[in-house]
Amino acid sequence: MAKYLLRRLLHGVFSIIAVVAIVMILIYSLMDRETVFDADNTYVHTASNQREVYKYRKWEEYGYLDYVPYSDYLNTLVRNGELDAATRDSVAAIGRKPANDSAATKKYVKQFTDYYESRGYTVVRLNAKMQTTTRVVSGGQQQLFAYKNTPLIVRLWKYFTHLISVENIHNIDKEIDIGKRGIKITLFDPVYQTYNEDGTIAHRKLALAIIGNGTRHKYLLYTDGQFPYIHQNLISINLGKSYSVRQGIDVFITMKDHQGSYVMSTVTFPTGITEESAYDLHSATFSQGSRNSLAFYQARFTDDYTNMSTVKGNPSKVGYSFMIGIIAVIASYLIGVPLGVIMARKKDKLVDKIGTIYIVFIIAVPSLAYIFLFKAIGGKLGLPTTFIMDSKSKLMYILPIVSLALPSIAGLMKWIRRYMIDQMNSDYVKFARSGGLSEGEIFNKHILKNAIIPIVHGIPASVAAAIVGAIITERVYVVPGAGNLLTEAINKYDNGVIVGVTLFYATLSVLSIILGDILMSLVDPRISFSSKAR
C-alpha cells in the first residue's frame, strides 16, 4: 500500500508541475505581455518615458524579467564601497542625450552598459523626446536601465520554491532597525487586553498567542472563538499575486478571505485606544515607516506592524462554492443512487423509461441552456434568481444548488443503472438464483455492492469539485465563489491568478484520484494496492 501511494503521489506531483508548466508556456510565451496593462489605470495615465519605466518595473514584479535601473546599480557600488555617495549623486542624473553627459557620468554609464550586456541583459536608454516633467513616485526619473527576460524553467523553479514560506525573525531586512528580534509565547494575548487611564492593564484574557518581531506577520499563532479556533500565520501558501482581480493580493488569500460588509467590534489598539473598528489586529503585517507616516497609526500602534485586513461578515469565495457544491453533491447521491437502483430493478418498465428521458434531456441539452431554464422556472415560482451577498434569505441558495444537483443526479442514475444491469448478467448472479436467493437479496448483497464500487471512486472528485466551484452556474447566478474567479482572471488577463487557480485545481484533482482509490479499496477488500503498484 505504501509503495502504491508513494508512486501515485510522485506521479501526481509530476502531473501538477507539467500542467502548470504548460499553462505558463501558453500565457507567458504565446500571449502578448502588454495585455497585463489593459486594466491598469496607472499605466494608461502615465506619460512617455515614465510609462516605459513603470512597464518594466511591473514586468519584473510579475516575473517576466529581471529589471535593473541605473540608480540601483550606483547604489550597489556605494554599498560595496566602490563609490562614495557624493560621486553617486553627481553621476546619477544623465542628460537628454549621451553627448550632454559629463565625463564622470559617461564613465559610469559605460561601466553599467558593459557590465550588464556582458551578462546577457539588454540596456535601454530612453529617447530625449520622451522626456517629461512627470516624476515616478519611487526612485525619481529613470532614463537608463537594463533588463533580461526570465526563462520559463527559471520562472517555474521560482514559482514552486516560493510556493510555501515559513516565517522567521529575519524576514524583515536586517538593515531595518526594529529593536530586538525574536519570538515569544504568551498565554495572555495582548489583543484582548484593556487598559486603565494611567496605561496599566485593566483586564486580560487567557488566550494562547505566539508573537514575532522581525517576522512578516506579528501574530504567528493565535486563538479566538471562530472556527477552527486556532489560527496560524507561521506557514503561508503563495499561489501567486494578482495583477488586476485583486491587485497585489495573493491568489490563496483572495480565495480564502471573507467578503461582504464590514463587521464592527470593540477593538483595543496596542497604545490602549479603544474604539469600534473592523480591523483584525491578528492579521497585522510589517510596513516599514508606516507608524510615522500617519497620525492615525501613531496614536494606535507602538511599532510598524500596522498593515491589517478587515473583518467581513460573509463567507470566502471557496466558502460560498463549497457550501453550494457540497449540498448539491449530497443531494445528488441521496437521490441519484436510489433512482438508478430502481431503474435497474424495473428495467424497461415505466419508471425506467421516465428516468431515461430525464437522463437524455440532461445529456442532450447544453448545460447553459438548462441552467437558464431552471432559473426562469425558479423566477416564476418566486425564488431569487440573483445571489445577493449581504441578503439574509437562504432561498437564494436553492437555484444554484438545483442547477448543480440535477445533472449530477442524471449522471449517477445512468452509471448505477448501467453497472447494475451489467452485474445482473454475471455468472455469480445466476449461481445465486440457482441457490434459492430472492431477487431482493441478490440485488442488495451482490449486485449493488459490486456496482457501487466505481461510483464510490468518484466521491472525492465530487467533493473537490465543490471546493473549486462551478464556473457556469456561479456566473449565471452571480455567486461570489471560486468558480467565477478563473473566468474573471481570464477576462482581465490576470496571469498570476490563472496560474495560481490552475495549480489549486490540479492539486485537488490529483488528491481526489488518490483518495478515490483508497475509498474504493475500503469498500471492496479484493482491490489490492500492491497489485496495482506492480
Image (spheres, rainbow, N blue to C red):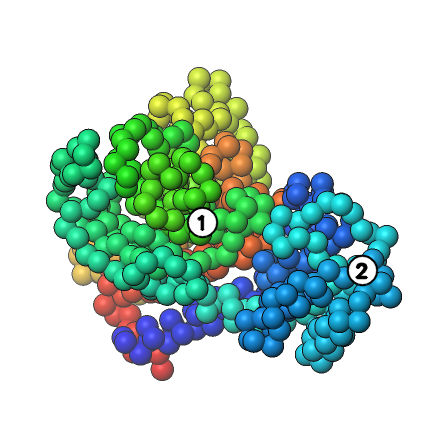
Crowd tier of the residue under label 2, counting other residues whose Cα lies within 10 Å: few below 14, some 14–19, many 20 or above: few
Q: Nearer the viewer, residue 90 or 150?
A: 90
Q: Which mark is residue 289?
A: 1
Look at the numbered discs 2 and 1 and tell me whether their residues touch, using CB distance below 8 Å.
no
Which residue is rendered at x = 71% and y = 80% of the image?
Answer: 118
- Left/right of residue 250 with respect to residue 133 in the rendered view: left
Disc 1 secondary structure class: loop
Q: Nearer the viewer, residue 51 or 504?
A: 51
- Quarter of the image with the N terminus is bottom left
- Residue 198 shows in the view: yes
Which residue is rendered at x = 70% and y = 54% of the image?
Answer: 141
Residue topped by disc 2: 95
Q: Tell me where residue 98 appears, x and y as whole percent.
A: 84, 65
- Left/right of residue 491 with respect to residue 314 in the rendered view: right
Which residue is rendered at x = 71% and y = 41% of the image?
Answer: 45
Q: Amino acid at mark 2?
A: Gly
Q: Amino acid at mark 1?
A: Gly
Disc 2 secondary structure class: loop
Position above or below: 169 against 81: above
Q: Tell me where residue 462 appears, x and y as whole percent.
A: 38, 50
- Quarter of the image with the C terminus is bottom left
Q: CA distance from mark 2 to mark 1?
A: 33 Å
Q: Tell me where residue 235 appears, x and y as whole percent.
A: 34, 60
- Left/right of residue 206 with respect to residue 248 in the rendered view: left
- Residue 351 shows in the view: no
Q: Nearer the viewer, residue 18 or 162?
A: 162
Which residue is rendered at x = 35% and y = 60% of the image?
Answer: 214
Q: Tell me where residue 406 appears, x and y as whole percent.
A: 43, 37
